[in-house]
Each structure stands twice: as C-alpha cells, then as structure tokens.
C-alpha cells in the first residue's frame, strides 16, 4: 500500500529524524507506529545514522503491530523486523537473527539486559507506550537506565504521558534525556514543581503542582516533544466559555477527527456547520460549540446571531479565507460590541509561520486601505 501521510505525520517523522531524543505524544489512531518506522527507515537507509534498533512495547503490540505495520506500506518493505516474544528459546532465536529492528515486550526488558547474555549493541531505542516506564522504582526502568548511555537515539511514544499526574513525567524523561530537562533526581523534580497535598503528619500521600508549574514543565520538555497541547488548550477555552457559544475553525480533516473525539470525551454538544439546519441551530444559540472549515465560511454566510467568540485551531495560508471566516461573526447584526478571536499556536511549528504570514498580509491590506481613504478623503488622517 502506498503511504500518503498527513501533514502532521510528515512533521512528526521529520521531528524524530532531526532530534536524537524525541517524545511523540499523539492520541491513539494517529499513526505513531508508521511515523516512527518511516523515521527509522530514513535514518537507516538514507542517512546511515543508525544500524540496529530496539522497540519495547506492550505484549500484543510487540507481537502483532510493528511487523504488521511495516509489511503494510510499500516504502517500508525492505525493513527486516524480528519479533522476540514468547518462550526464552524463541526470544533468543529472534534476537540472534539478522534484522534492522528487534521488537520485545516490556516484561522482558530486565531479562534482555541482565540475564540473556546477549550484547546490548542497539544504537536506537523506541519505547512504545512510554507511560509504562513512569515508575522509577520498577525493575525494567532500572535495567534500562543501566544501558541508556550507550544508545544514540531514543524515541518515546504515548498518547497518555501523564495519565495519573505530572509526577509521571519525571521517570519518562529521565529515560529519554538522562535528566537534562526535569533533573536527575525525583526529589529535585518534586521540590521544584510540587507541594504536599494529602498527608498525615510527616507522611505525604500525594503532591499537587505549584502554581505555574504545569507550564514550566511543558516549557522544559517542549523542545523534544510533540504533544496534544493544542487540544488541551481548546478544552481550557471551552471550559472557560462556561456554556457560551464557541465557533472553532479547523483546516485539516485529521484535526476535525481529533477535536470531535475530545469534545465527545468532554460530553460537549457540538455540530459541524455544513448544512442549513446546523447553521440555524447555531444562530438560535443552541450549540455550545460549532465547528467550521474556512473553505465553507465564504461570503454571505451569517453566523453573527449565534455568538461572538471564534477560535482558530488550525490556520489557513489563505488570507481571504482567514478574513472571511472572521467576518462571519464580526459583521452587521452582531449583538455584542466585541468579537473575540483566539489562535491556538504551538511555538516552533508551522502554525506560528502561518500566523506571522497572515499578520503580514493584514498589515499590507491595512496600508492599502489607509492609502485609498487618504486619496478619497483628501485630508484623511489615521487616528
């Protein structure tokens, strides 16, 4: 099958190739496996930066997913993958085979490193479901830390990096970057970003983040991480709206899928504005959230009765479509004196470049309009 990646998949693959240590935090179903295999293939077959990779995954994923995914796509057909699961003699046979990528289940990490007597000569490591290594006291974590310094490239994959709390991130990133970003010791991390929560005298049962620590942590790990922060930001905006209607603009189909999945999880009523009935429902104020694609938000579409708050989840390069979408709310008949337009933009991504380009086009257009007004009005002066 021919691989036709989405833009975010291309971005993630390039990100892995360009970062010796990377954390790919994408929701289930967004193609983390093919993204990673494509990057490994490039690093092995094109740039020759790595020669032998180890993938650690949950048992079912290790047994089925990685080899099946590689065989599915034409561009990965020359990758040799050996799956080392099952009884010890089966694992040993698989690990002694000539291959490019070796896959084991997480339960056998300690066995591989401390008991198998095999040479640990992998120059790339993929931890599929990184959150399984959130316990720094677990045997598999300690075993992997013994060989971490010998591995040139490490890739962590998960859709739930902090499934319980932000405390989970310390062990995960200790494996990835040897403590460079969140510190080498859990006590240092805990005292920097957290404060005791539930306790009994001197015994602390749980910790809660200090004010501002969440952003501080994300800023520390942001340079090596692709995560779902845009969806988190959208959720924050939806919750802050407190039921007031919110119009959300998206550009890519995969973003629409991710947004709808998150809104369903939040139990928020929403519709795509792609029919007369959905538009009428929005204008009657019956939708807390409405989703719109800029290409369908053309001239003459009246949405101003439904609300005054627009959020750009994904931007378009087209200034005309951008401007026309904004004008669906900011137009004659808008009951509010203010229309709020927000952009969810992750630093260092393509969205940042698009927004700067749109701002530049706005300045150019404003200058043109000012010149025309001056010409028509004679003594026009901008206030």
Image (cartoon, rainbow, N blue to C red):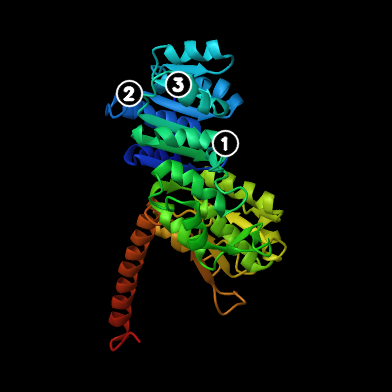
- Helix, strand, or loop for circle 2? loop
* Relative image position of residue 378 (x, y in whole percent): 28, 86
Is residue 339 in sight in this rendering? yes
Q: Are marks 3 and 2 in contact (CB under 8 Å)?
A: no
Within 10 Å of disc 2 (Cα), the crowding (few <14, some 14-19, many 20+) is some
Q: Work out whether 368 lies above or below 12.
A: below
Q: Which residue is mark 2?
A: 51
The picture quadrant where one finds residue 22 is: top left
Q: Work out whether 149 lies above or below 294.
A: above
Mark in front: 1 vs 3: 3
Residue visible at 55% across and 34% down in the picture: 139
Q: Which residue is mark 3?
A: 102
- Helix, strand, or loop for circle 1? loop
Residue visible at 41% across and 59% down in the picture: 320
Q: Which of the two labelled residues, at mark 2 and mark 1, occupies the earlier sequence position?
A: 1
Q: Which of the two labelled residues, at mark 1 and mark 3, occupies the earlier sequence position?
A: 1
- Helix, strand, or loop for circle 3? strand
* Relative image position of residue 368 (x, y in whole percent): 30, 71
Closest to the observer, 297 or 63: 63
Q: Which residue is mark 1?
A: 29
Q: How many numbered marks does the figure carry? A: 3
Calculate the distance from the C-alpha at mark 1 to the C-alpha at mark 3.
Answer: 23 Å
Is residue 4 in sight in this rendering? no
């Amino acid at each position: 099958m021919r691989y036709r990646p989405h833009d975010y998949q291309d971005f993630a693959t390039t990100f892995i190739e360009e970062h010796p240590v990377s954390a790919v935090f994408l929701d289930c179903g967004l193609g983390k496996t093919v993204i990673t295999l494509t990057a490994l293939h490039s690093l092995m077959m094109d740039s020759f930066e790595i020669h032998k990779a180890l993938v650690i995954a949950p048992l079912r994923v290790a047994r089925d997913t990685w080899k099946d995914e590689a065989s599915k796509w034409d561009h990965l057909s020359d990758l040799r993958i050996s799956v080392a699961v099952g009884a010890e003699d089966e694992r040993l046979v698989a690990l002694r085979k000539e291959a490019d990528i070796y896959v084991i289940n997480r339960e056998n990490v300690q066995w591989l490193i401390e008991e198998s007597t095999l040479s640990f000569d992998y120059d790339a490591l993929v931890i599929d479901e990184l959150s399984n290594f959130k316990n720094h006291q677990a045997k598999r974590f300690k075993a992997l830390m013994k060989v971490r310094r010998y591995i040139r490239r490490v890739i962590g994959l998960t859709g739930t990096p902090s499934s319980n709390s932000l405390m989970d991130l310390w062990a995960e990133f200790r494996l990835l970057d040897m403590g460079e970003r969140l510190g080498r010791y859990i006590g240092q991390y805990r005292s920097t970003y957290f404060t005791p929560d539930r306790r009994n005298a001197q015994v602390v049962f749980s910790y809660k983040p200090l004010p501002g620590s969440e952003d501080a942590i994300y800023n520390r790990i942001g340079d090596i991480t692709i995560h779902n922060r845009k969806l988190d930001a959208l959720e924050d905006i939806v919750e802050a709206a407190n039921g007031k209607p919110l119009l959300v603009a998206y550009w890519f189909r995969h973003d629409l899928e991710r947004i709808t999945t998150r809104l369903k999880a939040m139990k928020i009523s929403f519709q795509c504005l792609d029919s007369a009935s959905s538009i009428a429902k929005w204008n009657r104020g019956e939708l807390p959230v409405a989703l719109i694609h800029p290409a369908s938000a053309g001239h003459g579409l009246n949405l101003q009765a439904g609300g005054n708050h627009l959020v750009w989840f994904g931007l378009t390069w087209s200034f005309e479509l951008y401007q026309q979408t904004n004008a669906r709310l900011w137009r004659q008949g808008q009951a509010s004196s203010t229309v709020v337009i927000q952009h969810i933009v992750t630093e260092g991504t393509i969205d940042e470049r698009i927004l700067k380009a749109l701002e530049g086009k706005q300045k150019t257009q404003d200058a043109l309009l000012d010149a025309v007004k001056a010409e028509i009005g004679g003594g026009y002066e901008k206030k």
